[in-house]
Every structure is written in C-alpha cells, then in structure tokens.
C-alpha cells in the first residue's frame, strides 16, 4: 500500500475525480455514509483556506487512488479531523473491501495522534480506538416525501398534525408562507448567522460565529455551488420576511444539517420544524437519500428522525511522547462533557445554568448599548 501526503490544492484533477467517484458510488458498495459532504474534497479545500495544516493522505493500490484521508496537522505531529469542532462526519473515504492499518497510516502522515469526534460507521481500524459512540439521527427521504410524511404521521400523528396546522396558521397571521431551497442572497446568510449567534448567547453556549475562521468557512462554502458538494442555504419566508433559515452542506445523496435558526418573534409557530419539513420535501425531489441531523440530543431531532446512524469519538495513537501528553490533556475534558450530556440528572441542571448565564450576558449587552 503506497501512501502519499498532499496539500488540498496539490491534488491532481484525476485524484479529485477519483475521490468524488468513491463518494458517489458509496451507496452501491454498502457504505452510504461515505457520501457525506463533510468527507468531500470541497469541504477539505474550504477548510484549508481558513485553517493551517490541512493535508490529504492518498492511499494507492496498483498506482490507482484507493482511499483519501483529510486531516489537520500541527507542527508537533498532533493530527485532528478536518474542521474538528464543526465537522459532523469524519473518516477515510475508501473503495469497498480496502484494508488498512491505522497506525501505519498515521506514521505515513507524520502523526503521533489523530483525534476524531464524528467518526463514520464502517471504519474498524479507527473504531478500535473509539472512546464513545453517539447517535446521529437522520430523515430518510429516498422513497419520496409523501412516504416520509406518512411514516412521520404513523409514528407521531399529533406532532405531524400540529406542525402542519401551525404552518397554516402562520400563513394566515403573517402572510403567505414561502420556501426557498437554494437561497443565493448573501443578506439571508448574514441574517441566519445573526440569529444563530443570538441563540448561542441566549442559551449560554459559545458563539461559533465569534471565531472569524468559522464565519469565513461558512461564507466560502456558501459561494461553493453544490456540484457535487457545497453549501446550501434554505430560507422560510412569511410574506417577504425571513423567519427561519438553515445553512448546511449537500452532496449528491446527503444533505448534512449544520446551522439552523429562526426569528424568536415567531417561535409559537415552530418555524424551525416547518423549515425542516420543507427541506425534506425539496431534498426528496432533488434526489437526496437522507438528511443527516447530526450528533446530539435534541427534541426536534427525535420528532423528525426515521432512524439513527452511529458516530464515534476517540484518538488513534502511536507510541510517542506527544500522543501521551495530548491524551492526558484531552481525555478528562471530553469524558466530563460526555458524562454530563448523557445523564439527564446532570444535563438538565447544567442546561438551565447555561441559559441563566445567557440571559445575564444578553442583559449586559443591552445595557452597554443604552
């Protein structure tokens, strides 16, 4: 097995075409999760414009590309999944039946450790190093939107009935409800990011858009047309006013949900749920197989999902002092967070505390403007 390492911009057109072909054929080879747009060359290239150290390991057999591993490398040899912290799918994009040794791959990349937090299913050499597994809900629309809606009604008739009734009421109260699946107005993206930042502050979470590189990444992906992978901004309007929006990534068969938000003034209409149903309808018509709602426990995800994928987090390590030191710093932090998130008796008080902190922050910001 021949392994070479490249910067994203150094990949040849043939290599990029081979990478894209592996993703487009993944569902035919029993690995449909590899079609996720977070595993695409377009995402790796976009991250490389915003963050240092992005590299692509290319595995060749008989001179032909057989697999691609995007990662980020520090000067000390610490490796992280590309876009770790904002990427919802990670792993090796490979041909069917490929076998590889995780530590051999790391050695070829010059890495002492490789950290992941959304490892895709079907990667045994990496999964052997996983510390925890998590559910990632999805909405299956490969049989068409009517079939999805029928399943939703059968599983939760009250939820489906109530959400559709709220959409009709929204139209009566606020003007005709209009949905744009692929909104190209940059102002709509700015509005979404403002809503999302306010939501982060309101709930006491760290504002991702306070990090310039994340804002830059989203804006770059917004201008990357989804052919075959790129950003997709979807907006729900009431009259001429945007009331909910979502920015995600799409590939040929997967729509990866990423940044949803809505105008709190319209919260009583559940605009976020209405938006997701419209997204599902449009995605089904566009040939998408499923919407990946992403790892995390959220009530709206439980209401919309048809099934769950499994993603993992952990560290692939070699015998190296850097790996020992890195794990010593990172393991306790992740273990504590995962314990709190997985146990309702701990998560609910922590969530309430974060929301109180968020309210205090919001009040201070209002007063500072007066």
Image (cartoon, rainbow, N blue to C red):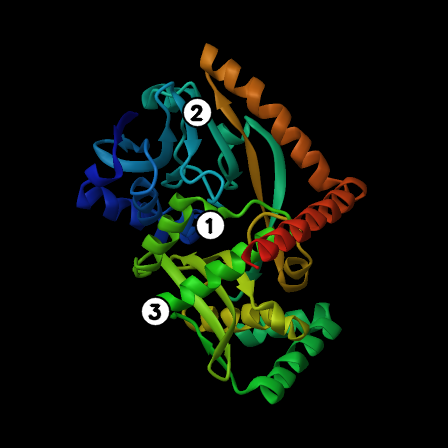
Q: Which residue is mark 3?
A: 184
Spatial CA span between label 2 and label 3 = 41 Å
Q: Which residue is mark 1?
A: 209
Of residue 162 and residue 239, the one placed in the foreground of this image is: 239
Spatial CA span between label 1 and label 2 = 34 Å
Determine the image quadrant of residue 285.
bottom left
- The label on residue 188 is none
Left or right: where does residue 349 sit relative to residue 108?
right
Spot occupied by residue 86 in the image (x, y as percentages of width and height): 47, 44
Residue ranking furthest to the front = 370
- Specify which label sits upstream in the sequence, 1 or 2: 2
Q: Is label 1 in a helix, a strand or a loop?
A: helix
Determine the image quadrant of residue 363.
bottom right
Spot occupied by residue 36 in the image (x, y as percentages of width and height): 43, 51
The N terminus, quarter of image? top left
- Mark 1 neighbour class, 10 Å CA radius: few under 14, some 14 to 19, many 20 or more: some
Of residue 166 and residue 67, the one placed in the foreground of this image is: 166
Residue 345's place in the image compared with 335, above or below, is: below
Spot occupied by residue 142 in the image (x, y as percentages of width and height): 50, 66
Q: Residue at x 41, y 47 (%)?
A: 214
Tell me, yes or no, whether the two marked residues, 2 and 3, touch with CB atoms within 8 Å.
no
Residue 210's place in the image compared with 139, above or below, is: above
Res 25 seen here: no
Res 193 seen here: yes
Q: Is label 2 in a helix, a strand or a loop?
A: helix
Residue 310's place in the image compared with 173, above or below, is: above
- Mark 2 neighbour class, 10 Å CA radius: few under 14, some 14 to 19, many 20 or more: some
Q: Which residue is mark 2?
A: 102
Q: Nearer the viewer, mark 1 or mark 2?
A: 1
Q: Residue at x 31, y 58 (%)?
A: 228
The C terminus, quarter of image? bottom right
């Amino acid at each position: 097995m021949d392994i070479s390492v490249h910067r994203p911009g150094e990949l040849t057109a043939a290599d990029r075409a081979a990478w894209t072909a592996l993703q487009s054929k993944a569902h035919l080879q029993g690995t449909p999760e590899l079609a996720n747009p977070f595993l695409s060359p377009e995402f790796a290239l976009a991250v490389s414009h915003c963050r240092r150290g992005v590299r692509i390991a290319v595995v060749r057999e008989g001179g032909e590309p057989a697999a691609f591993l995007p990662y980020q490398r520090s000067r000390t040899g610490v490796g992280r999944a590309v876009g770790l912290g904002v990427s919802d799918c990670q792993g090796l994009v490979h041909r069917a039946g490929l076998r590889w040794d995780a530590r051999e791959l790391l050695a070829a990349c010059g890495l002492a450790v490789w950290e992941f937090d959304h490892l895709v299913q079907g990667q045994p050499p990496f999964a052997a190093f996983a510390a925890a597994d998590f559910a990632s809900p999805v909405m299956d629309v490969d049989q068409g939107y009517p079939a999805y809606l029928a399943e939703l009604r059968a599983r939760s008739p009250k939820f489906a009935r109530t959400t559709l009734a709220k959409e009709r009421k929204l139209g009566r109260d606020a003007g005709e409800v209009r949905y744009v699946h692929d909104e190209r107005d940059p102002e709509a993206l700015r509005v979404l990011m403002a809503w999302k930042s306010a939501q982060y502050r309101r709930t006491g979470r760290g504002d991702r858009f306070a990090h310039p590189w994340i804002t830059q990444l989203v804006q770059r992906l917004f201008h990357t047309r989804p052919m075959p992978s790129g950003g997709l901004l979807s907006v729900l309007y009431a009259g001429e006013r945007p009331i909910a929006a979502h920015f995600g990534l799409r590939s040929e068969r997967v729509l990866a949900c990423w940044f949803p938000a809505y105008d709190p003034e319209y919260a009583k209409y559940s605009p976020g749920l209405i938006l997701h149903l419209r997204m599902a309808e449009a995605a089904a018509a566009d040939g998408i197989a499923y919407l990946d709602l992403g790892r995390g426990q959220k009530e709206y995800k439980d209401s919309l999902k048809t099934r769950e994928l499994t993603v993992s987090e952990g560290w692939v390590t070699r015998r190296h002092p850097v790996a020992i030191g890195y794990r010593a710093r990172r393991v306790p932090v992740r273990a504590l967070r995962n314990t709190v998130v997985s146990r309702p008796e701990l998560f609910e008080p922590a969530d309430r505390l974060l929301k109180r902190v968020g309210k205090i922050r919001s009040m201070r910001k209002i007063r500072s403007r007066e």
